[in-house]
Amino acid sequence: MIFKDNSKQDIRSTCIIFFSVLTFGKGSLMKRILISKFGDSSVLHLNESPIPTPAADQIVVKVERAGVNFLDIYQRGGAGVYQLSLPFTPGVEGAGVVVEIGSDVNYLKVGDRVVWAMALGSYAEYALLPGEKVAKVPEEIDLKIAAASALQGMTAHYLVNSTYLIKPGDVSLVHAAAGGTGNLLCQMILEKGGRVIATTSNSEKEKIIRETGVTEIIRYDLQNVLQEVKKMTEGKGVDVVYDGVGAATFDDSLASLKPRSLMVLFGAASGPVPPFDLQRLNLNGSLFITRPTLANYITNRQELEMRMGEVFKLITAGKL
């Protein structure tokens, strides 16, 4: 996901949902997607229901853009920690315009342009959201860019600033670097003076990665990832691994680290990592491992606004 060239904006490899415009008013109806049972995409059904009324700490937003993410697929399937109470309207990311606010929400007004991530209900014409869960969108940022950069942009931001603070010269291994989060990770690491070793599966994705400025790329369809990492680092290994793939890359990720370095497992696109013996961390050099999630890095409105604001600054500066 590169925003520098506006003529080539790849909003993301998934999609952006466009909803029709309704005239807002009490008693009006809206369309939304409703899930009444867990399963594949066949459980997504179009539903018509009244436009919600906000409680004291809530707002109603006219949804202009709704992002589609892997998290939506997990929640739709209802596996493990992703099993939500049925029925529900999916979608944890979006951008739009505030049309009504609750009595306790004094930091927003009707007409404000806002963006959110990790707040459910974006697959609808109107979303009922906690006021604390949205950030204002600057006038110079298009709402489609805001929606496309919220979840993945803030994820990349916390990963390189909070989970592990990238310093000049730090060497990072980024798996699935052509994907939305991986692509932004590469750009943010380079912007902070770090070095990126990226992995991907084909020549088309390799080209996408090279557009970020990354030159060290491992094709795991053709090469052995661990051997190439050791070669590129003269046998030393990397300072941090950013792994959103999970089961398929986990073993190579651990083995690619320097002693006392950090494995950041932030996703499981290939499936969850099976249980493993913690003694492996000792044997591989007293390694550290963490399993972060964005929700724990935007725990209040101040942190949300800080992270989203930093992402917006990078976009307007032409660095993303």
Image (cartoon, rainbow, N blue to C red):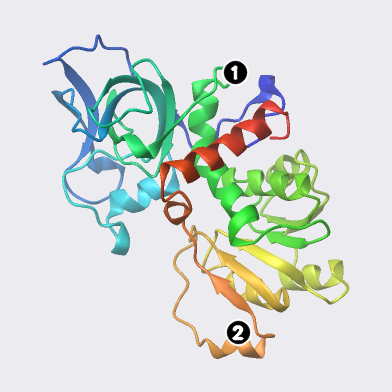
> Where does the image place residue 311, in percent across and percent down from the top left?
60, 37
Image quadrant assignment for residue 312: top right
Residue 277's place in the image compared with 218, above or below, is below
Question: Label 2, on which residue?
Answer: 281
Q: Is residue 250 left or right of residue 118?
A: right
Locate residue 30 relative to residue 159 in the image: left or right.
Answer: left
- Nearer to us in this view, 202 or 78: 78
User: Do we see residue 218 in this rendering?
Assistant: yes
Quadrant holding the N terminus = top right
| Residue 57, quarter of the rendered image | top left
Give the number of the disc on residue 249: none
Where is residue 37? Give x, y as percent. Answer: 18, 48
Q: Please give the name of the residue rendered at 75% of the width and 65% of the height, measured from the top-left corner.
A: 223
In this picture, residue 285 sits left or right of residue 228: left
Viewer-nearest of discs 1 and 2:
1
Q: Which residue is mark 1?
A: 140
x 76%, y 44%: residue: 191
Residue that lies at the very extreme toward the top in this rendered image: 23
Using a 10 Å C-alpha cutoff, classify the residue at mark 1 as few (fewer than 14 neighbours), some (14 to 19) or many (20 or more). few
Indicate the secondary structure of the residue bearing disc 1: loop
